[in-house]
Image: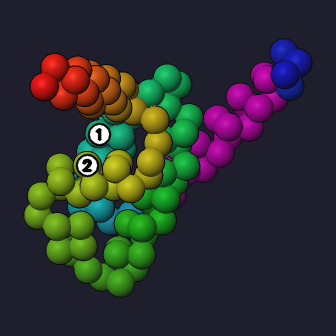
Amino acid sequence: MHPINSLKKMIEDKKVWGQHEKEVAKLPRDYQIVYKEVEKYLFNFAAGSGTDTIEGIYGLLEFLKEGAEAGIPVLEYVGEDVGEFAESYRASLKTKSWVDDPKKKAEKNVAKKLAELEKEK
């Protein structure tokens, strides 16, 4: 991508994120608190720049807006265990995560060593 086009995209992405943050600010305060915690959680596990996580964060806002508009208390909507909700939501996004690499490595190592063990029999 040409440097000027990269700069234009970065500026446009920043505008979109700014609009997104304005929408978050419109949520009821309890929903904002849950949103911010889940957002932090998602970014903590994002791989690389986290850009593939951004779409999921936009989706999170839409999901929470539905609960707020329906008048459902936030912890009734997402559950009392916000950490579990955040993890389930992260897993549902199927985005890249730095956590995935060690998991895949462990699975691969175990499979390899079990295969070697089988050959010894």
- Residue 97 visible in this rendered orientation of the protein: yes
Q: Residue at x 56, y 35 (%)?
A: 51
Asked if the magenta segment contains residue 8, the reply would be yes
User: Could you tell me what secondary structure mostly forms the magenta stretch?
Assistant: helix
Find out whether the residues at labels 2 and 1 contact each other: C-beta distance under 8 Å: yes
Q: Which of the 4 image quadrants contains residue 109?
A: top left
Residue lying furthest top = 3
What is the three-letter code of the residue carrying label 2? Glu
Q: Residue at x 22, y 23 (%)?
A: 119
Task: Please give the range of residues in magenta.
Answer: 6-23
Residue 75 position within the rendered picture, expressed as x and y whole percent measured from the top left: 17, 67
What is the three-letter code of the residue carrying label 1? Tyr
Residue 27 position within the rendered picture, expressed as x and y whole percent measured from the top left: 39, 63
Q: Mark 2 or mark 1: which comes first in sequence?
A: 1
- Residue 22 visible in this rendered orientation of the protein: no
**Left or right of 102, for residue 43:** right
The residue at which mark 1 appears reads as: 41
Which sits in the foreground, 76 or 69? 76
**Left or right of 111, for residue 5:** right
Location of residue 105 with respect to 20 vertically, above or below: above
Which sits in the foreground, 113 or 29? 113
Name the element at disc 2: helix
**Left or right of 34, for residue 91:** right
Determine the CA span between mark 2 and mark 1. 8 Å
Name the element at disc 1: helix
Q: Residue at x 35, y 74 (%)?
A: 68
The residue at which mark 2 appears reads as: 87
Which tag is nearer the camera, tag 2 or tag 1? 2
Residue 52 position within the rendered picture, expressed as x and y whole percent measured from the top left: 54, 39
Residue 72 position within the rendered picture, expressed as x and y whole percent measured from the top left: 26, 80
Asked if the magenta segment contains residue 22, the reply would be yes
